[in-house]
Image (tube, helix red, strand yellow):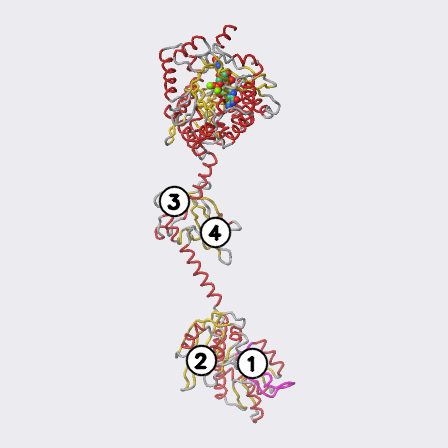
């Protein structure tokens, strides 16, 4: 028997003392005796007894029944009434107060003992029940469960607050039946739910249910179905909203799909940087299976040049917990793949680091593209040679090196000769191939650490670091020159170009890159000026020449308008009869600064700038007008030879010009002869068309400077020309050797068999004229007979007399 700590409420002191004694004899303790309700409540508060023995009649206001109610409500203490009253009214009132026992006075000890023991065990049971109820309530609350019940007989749902919260207002317990609940279930899940609700015993299911808002929520339902009788089923169940969990699951599912299918390689590390898992892309990228990397430090697979060790601790310390950078990923086969690495810290709610997620994106393609871009930026796409930027870069560093070692650097400026004509007449695609071929020839002539650059167009620069003597620079330049002068075979065409090369040396000719380049450029212009196809080195007086050239180029604009051009006319003589056949019109420029300039000083520039077209048109018109004037003087049989440049042959403009000029000056087309140079024949087909056009107009066509180019004699057969003019360089060698004579006579025989007229140019001596005479007496032109002179120099009388045989013999005697 347990010892109770009992508080006695009794207004009769004698009874109270007796009771105290009895209780103590029974082994209990008495913690206080009170006589009124207020004092009793006070005493309970103070002593916290385990049991109260309560008289119903008390002193003062209130009685034991009221005190009992108060004590039970406040402290849930067991109270036993001990009273003299046993009338029905009192007993009924007392019952309402739910006492733990009712004993009438006088009591006997046995009864008191029994009542106390019953009260104790009932109180213990009540306490235990309350505790388990409380536990259940906490559990339901914690699980966020709504509880519900359904009885089949009444078809009535009952549910708690949360049940209503989950279903919303549309499903009022006590009003709605099971059908109302089922009507909210998603059609796809309805069969399952109905089936579950017919399973005896414990059940559990998940389904979607429509909320008031119309959206579906995921619900989880547990319950127990009992059958009381055939038609009475009872379901007691619990329900909860698992929408957030379902959404989370869905997100996790998506994340796991992403993890396993994304092309980026992902590594998940624990807080210490050891690998927890990797996705298939990582295995694909690195060649390592998941098993091979798990539990290894992630660092084993990273190669970071900038920061040797990536510190996960430091990354976690940053506010973003994030790091990104370029890192090499060490693959199983030993390759290092360039990747962009992202490291992201994963924390729990308290901010503690749980994991790191590491993503690798393969950027080797990007790096490759970057390299290509850099290559493009520094190289010429046509030839693959470096470009100006590369030259700037490399030459600068080369100069610094040469400076510190006291070495000489040679800079070569190469410009192709005759390229423009090819590009203009044959088109850019042929021009491009010529440039490519030239580039590769240049490269073949230089050493590995020499550098060839294409500046643009047909200009190249070659840098030779570390030449010992300047003559070494000349040797290389001449090798390149020779290589570039070999004919280029493109498909069926054989093209001839050459090059003019300017040389400058560091440190003699300049210390700065720009100075050296412009020195080499000036030297190249000098090479052009001296007749192309040669190497020139820079010297300070070259600067003057370049300045002149610039002046010429600028002055040429407007020179036509200012009437600065004049035509000189050089007689063409019939060698056999020694009479005047006609003239060749040769242009001169009365330059306001430099005086009279010959065509070698400005025709090439006019061709480059395109000014040759208006100038050429002026020459044609002026020469034909002059021819007309001389016919008026009585020589309507004279020939007039006019030089044309390839640039004038673009389109149909030239033929139209010819037509107009002949018409305007009423000249017999046969009197006009257009001279084209042998180098123009490189574009054979279009030149042939042009020659054909001129021939159809009745105009004669001569090939000038014959023998200097590479035109095949066989080709001439297919070209309706009327004359060849043997170049001065052949005549100059006369009398010369038998070989020189043989060459000229072979040309004359060939011309003869093709029924072509021949003019020999540059006859300067009597001997030369005599030798030519023995070979078949062609038409001749040369200082021996006459220099080119302005039209005014030829008087009407001179023109008239010139038709007489032997006229030039007389002229020579007069000299
Ligand atoms: P080309 O057509 O071969 O003209 C002959 C050149 O030889 C002329 O030089 C002439 O003065 C020169 N010459 C004539 N006889 C002798 C001689 O006995 N000894 C020497 N040493 N030279 C002689 P020029 O006038 O300086 O003309 C040079 C070139 O300029 C011409 O060569 C021609 O290709 C070009 N040219 C002249 N006028 C024109 C023009 O109006 N249009 C075009 N497109 N070119 C022209
Ligand atoms: Mg000529
Ligand atoms: Mg000539």
- Mark 3 Cα within 10 Å, few/some/many (few <14, many 20+)? some
Residue identifier under label 3: 330
Q: Please, what secondary structure does the residue beneath circle 3 have?
A: strand
Sequence-wise first label, 4 or 1: 1
Q: Is residue 610 left or right of residue 759?
A: right
Of marks 2 and 4, which one's residue comes earlier in the chain? 2
Task: Please tell me the numbered disc located at residue 344.
Answer: 4
Whether residue 506 appears in this view of the structure is no
**CB under 8 Å between discs 2 and 3:** no
Q: What element carries label 4?
A: strand
Q: Which residue is more in the foreground, 562 or 410? A: 562
Mark 3 or mark 2, which is nearer the start of the sequence? Answer: 2
The magenta stretch spans which residues?
A: 48-77
Residue bearing the label numbered 1: 72
Residue 578, image x and y in percent?
Answer: 46, 11
Note whether ligand 1 is within 8 Å of mark 2: no
For mark 1, give the secondary structure. helix
> In the rendering, at what x and y percent does residue 89 appear?
58, 92
Real-space Cα distance between discs 2 and 1?
Answer: 35 Å
Along the line of sight, the residue nearer the viewer: 31 or 412: 412
Residue 620 is situated, as x and y percent measured from the top left of the image, at: 53, 24
- Label 2: which residue? 235
Q: Is residue 571 above or below residue 68?
A: above
Q: Are marks 4 and 1 in contact (CB under 8 Å)?
A: no
Q: Which marked residue is nearer to the observer: mark 3 or mark 1?
A: 3
Q: Distance between the residues labelled 2 and 4?
A: 50 Å
| Disc on res. 223 | none
Q: Find the residue positioned furthest to the front.
A: 634
N-terminal label among 2 and 1: 1
């Amino acid at each position: 028997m347990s010892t109770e700590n009992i508080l006695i409420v009794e207004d009769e002191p004698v009874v109270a003392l007796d009771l105290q004694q009895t209780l103590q004899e029974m082994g209990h303790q008495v913690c206080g005796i009170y006589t009124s309700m207020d004092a009793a409540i006070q005493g309970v508060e103070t002593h916290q007894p385990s049991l109260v023995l309560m008289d119903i009649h008390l002193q003062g206001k209130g009685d034991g029944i009221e005190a009992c109610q108060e004590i039970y409500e406040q402290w849930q203490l067991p109270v036993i009434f001990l009273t003299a009253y046993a009338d029905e009214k009192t007993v009924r009132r007392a019952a309402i107060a739910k006492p733990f026992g009712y004993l009438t006075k006088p009591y006997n000890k046995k009864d008191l003992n029994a009542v106390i023991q019953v009260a104790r065990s009932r109180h213990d049971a009540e306490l235990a029940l309350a505790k388990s109820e409380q536990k259940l309530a906490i559990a339901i609350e914690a699980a966020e469960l709504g509880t519900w019940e359904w009885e089949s007989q009444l078809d009535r749902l009952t549910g708690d607050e949360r049940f209503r919260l989950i279903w919303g207002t549309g499903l009022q317990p006590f009003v709605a039946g099971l059908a109302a609940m089922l009507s909210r279930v998603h059609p796809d899940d309805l069969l399952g739910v109905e089936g579950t609700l017919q399973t005896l015993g414990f059940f559990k299911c998940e389904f979607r249910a429509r909320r008031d808002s119309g959206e579906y929520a995921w619900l989880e339902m547990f319950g127990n179905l009992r059958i009381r009788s055939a038609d009475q089923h009872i379901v007691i169940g619990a329900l909860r909203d698992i929408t957030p969990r379902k959404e989370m699951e869905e997100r996790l599912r998506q994340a796991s799909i992403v993890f396993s299918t994304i092309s980026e390689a992902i590594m998940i590390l624990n807080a210490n940087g050891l690998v927890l898992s990797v996705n298939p892309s990582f295995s694909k990228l690195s060649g390592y299976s998941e098993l091979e990397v798990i539990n290894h430090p992630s660092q084993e697979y990273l190669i970071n040049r900038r920061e040797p060790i990536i510190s996960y601790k430091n990354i976690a310390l940053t506010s973003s917990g994030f790091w990104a950078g370029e890192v090499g990923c060490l693959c199983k086969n030993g390759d290092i793949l360039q990747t962009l690495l992202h490291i992201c810290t994963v924390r729990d709610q308290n901010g503690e680091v749980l994991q790191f997620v590491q993503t690798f994106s393969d950027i080797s393609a990007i790096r490759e593209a970057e390299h290509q871009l850099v290559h493009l930026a520094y190289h010429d796409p046509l030839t693959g040679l470096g470009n100006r930027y590369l030259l700037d870069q490399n030459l600068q560093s080369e100069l610094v090196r040469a400076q510190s070692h006291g070495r000489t650097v040679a800079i070569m400026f190469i410009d192709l000769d005759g390229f423009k004509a090819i590009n203009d007449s044959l088109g850019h695609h042929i021009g491009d191939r010529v440039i490519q071929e030239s580039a590769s020839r240049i490269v073949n002539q230089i050493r590995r650490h020499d550098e060839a650059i294409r500046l643009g167009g047909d200009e190249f620069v070659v840098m030779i670091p570390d030449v010992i003597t300047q003559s070494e620079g000349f040797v290389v330049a001449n090798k390149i020159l020779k290589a570039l002068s070999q004919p280029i075979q493109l498909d069926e065409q054989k093209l001839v170009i050459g090059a003019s090369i300017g040389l400058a040396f560091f440190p003699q000719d300049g210390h700065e890159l720009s100075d050296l380049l412009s020195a080499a450029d000036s030297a190249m212009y000098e090479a052009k000026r001296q007749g192309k196809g040669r190497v020139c080195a820079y010297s300070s007086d070259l600067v003057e020449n370049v300045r002149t050239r610039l002046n010429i180029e600028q002055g040429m604009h407007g020179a036509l308008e200012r009437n600065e051009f004049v035509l000189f006319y050089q007689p063409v003589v019939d060698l056999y009869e020694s009479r005047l056949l006609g003239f060749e019109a040769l242009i001169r420029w009365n330059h306001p600064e430099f005086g009279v300039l010959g065509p070698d000083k400005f025709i090439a520039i006019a061709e480059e700038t395109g000014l040759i077209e208006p100038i050429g048109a002026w020459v044609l018109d002026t020469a034909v007008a002059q021819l007309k004037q001389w016919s008026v003087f009585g020589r309507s049989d004279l020939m007039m030879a006019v030089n044309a440049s390839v640039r004038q042959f673009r389109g149909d403009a030239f033929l139209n010009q010819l037509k107009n000029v002949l018409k305007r000056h009423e000249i017999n087309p046969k009197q006009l002869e257009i001279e084209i140079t042998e180098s123009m024949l490189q574009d054979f087909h279009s030149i042939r068309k042009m020659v054909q056009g001129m021939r159809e107009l009745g105009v004669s066509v001569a090939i000038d400077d014959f023998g200097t180019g590479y035109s095949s004699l066989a080709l001439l057969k297919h070209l309706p020309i009327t004359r060849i003019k043997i170049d001065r360089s052949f005549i100059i060698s006369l009398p010369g050797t038998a070989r020189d004579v043989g060459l000229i006579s072979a040309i004359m025989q060939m011309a003869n068999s093709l029924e072509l007229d021949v003019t020999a140019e540059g006859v300067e001596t009597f001997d030369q004229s005599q030798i030519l005479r023995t070979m078949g007496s062609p038409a001749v032109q040369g200082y021996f007979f006459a220099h080119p002179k302005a039209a005014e120099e030829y008087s009407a009388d001179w023109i008239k007399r010139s038709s007489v045989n032997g006229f030039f013999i007389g002229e020579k005697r007069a000299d």
